[in-house]
Amino acid sequence: MRIGVLTGGGDCPGLNAVIRAVVRKGIEIYGHDIVGFREGWRGPMLGLIHPLGLADVEHILPLGGTILGTSRTNPYRDGGPEQVRQTLAEHGVDALIAIGGEDTLGVAQRLHEDGLFVVGVPKTIDNDLSVTDYTVGFDTAVHIATEAIDRLHTTAESHHRVAIVEVMGRHAGWIALHSGMAGGANVILMPERPFSVSWVCQWVTRCLDRVSAAIVVVAEGAIPEGGAEVLAAAEVDAFGHRRLGGVGIWLAGEIARRTGAEARAVVLGHIQRGGTPTAYDRVLATRLGVHAIDAVHEGDSGVMVALRGTEIVRVKLADATAAVKTVPQHRHTEAEVFFG
Ligand code: F6P
C-alpha cells in the first residue's frame, strides 16, 4: 500500500514521534510505501507530497514541531474534497493518516464519509478530544506551564505580588486545571465555569495575608460572570475559531484596582506548544503511531486510535469529533479545595 501522513491544526510536541512510528512500522514491518503531505490539508489539496523513508525519521523522536509543517486549511471551505481525492489518485495513495485535533479530524471524518480511506491520531495541547483520555502534546504543555508556575511562586513571594498566569486550551480548562494543581496555584479559572472577580479577589487577599503572594492560573477561554471571552483578534480561522487571549492582563488590572495589591500577568502563549516532548508524550505518540499504521494495514477506515486507561484502542472518528471534551464539575471541585 501507499500511505500518506499529514499533521494539521496547531503544532505540538510529539507530532514527529507519531510520524516516526508510522514510518518505522509501515516500512520495516509491513513493507508499505509512506509519503508525507506538507502543511496539513493544504498538502493533499495542492499535491505537496514527498516520500518519507527511514532516513527521514532518524533523530526526530525528541524534536518538537512537525517535519511535515502544518496549517489550518479546511478543504470543505477552501476548495472542496474533490481536490484531495484527485491528488491521492494521481499519486497512487491508498490511505491517509491524519494527525490532528477536532478540526483536522473533523475533516478526516467527512472525507471518510465521502469514501476516502482515513485513520486519525489525536493530538492537541488542549486535550479536548472526546473518547481519548489524553492527546499528544498535552503532557508537555502542562509540564511547561507547571515549570512557569513554580518559577512565579518565588518571584511573587519576594515582591509580595499577585502573579496571574494565562494558559492556552481554547474552550477547555485542562491545561489550567493540571498545571494549576501541579504548581500549587491559589486560584484556577477555567472556561467551563464563569468566575466571580470578587471571589477571586477574596481568595487572593487571603493568600496575601497568609503567604504574602498569590498565584492565579487562568485559562485563555475563562469568562467572568456576566462577561464574555476576551479575544486577541477579531478575525476567525478556516474552522470559524476566534483567537483567544488577554483575560490574564484584564484580570491583573481588576485585582490591582479592587485589592490594592501589585499584580503582574504572564501570558505563556505558544511557549506551551514549542520544544521537545516529555517522555510521556513520546511514548504516547509512538504507541498511537504504531496502532494507526496497524489500523490502515488491516483496512479499518474511519477510526481514530485512542488512549483508554493504559491501552490503545480504536474508536469511531465520528465519536471522537462529535463533542469537545471539557473539564467536568467534579474535577473543578477537587481543585477548589486548594483555592485561597
Ligand atoms: O488548539 C491549540 C491552540 O494552541 C489553542 O490552545 C489556542 O487557542 C490556539 O491553538 C492558538 O492558535 P494559533 O496557533 O493559531 O495562535
Image (cartoon, rainbow, N blue to C red):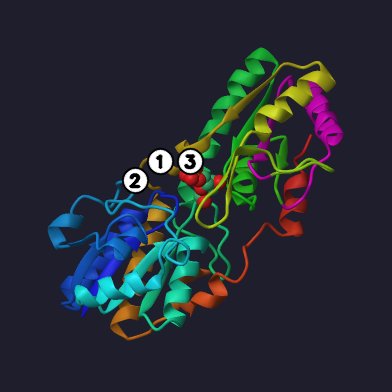
Dot label at residue 274: 1
Question: Do the residues bearing badges 1 and 2 touch, measured as CB atoms within 8 Å?
Answer: yes
- Cβ of mark 1 under 8 A from ligand 1: no
Badge 2 marks a residue whose secondary structure is loop
Residue depicted at 63% across the width and 41% down the height: 220
Dot 2: within a 10 Å radius of its alpha carbon, few (fewer than 14), some, or many (20 or more) residues? many
Q: Which residue is drawn at 70% across and 46% down?
A: 190
Direction bottom: furthest residue: 299
**Relative to 51, residue 228 above or below:** above
Q: Mark 2 points at which residue?
A: 64
Distance between the alpha carbons at the discs numbered 1 and 2: 6 Å
Q: Is residue 158 left or right of residue 44?
A: right
Residue type at numbered disc 1? Gly
Check residue 323 in the rendering and tell me which mark sits there, or answer none.
none
Query: Of the residues under marks 2 and 3, which one precedes in the sequence?
Result: 2
Residue 47 lies within the magenta run: no
Which one is in front, 146 or 131?
Answer: 131
Q: Is residue 204 visible?
A: yes
Amino acid type indicated by mark 2: Gly
The residue segment tinted magenta is 192-221
* Residue 312 can be seen in this image: no
Side of 31 where 17 appears, left or right: right
Contact check, label 3 and label 1, Cβ < 8 Å: yes
Q: Quadrant of the C terminus?
A: top right
Q: Is mark 3 within 8 Å of ligand 1?
A: yes
Mark 1 and mark 2 lie on one chain; the one further toward the N terminus is 2
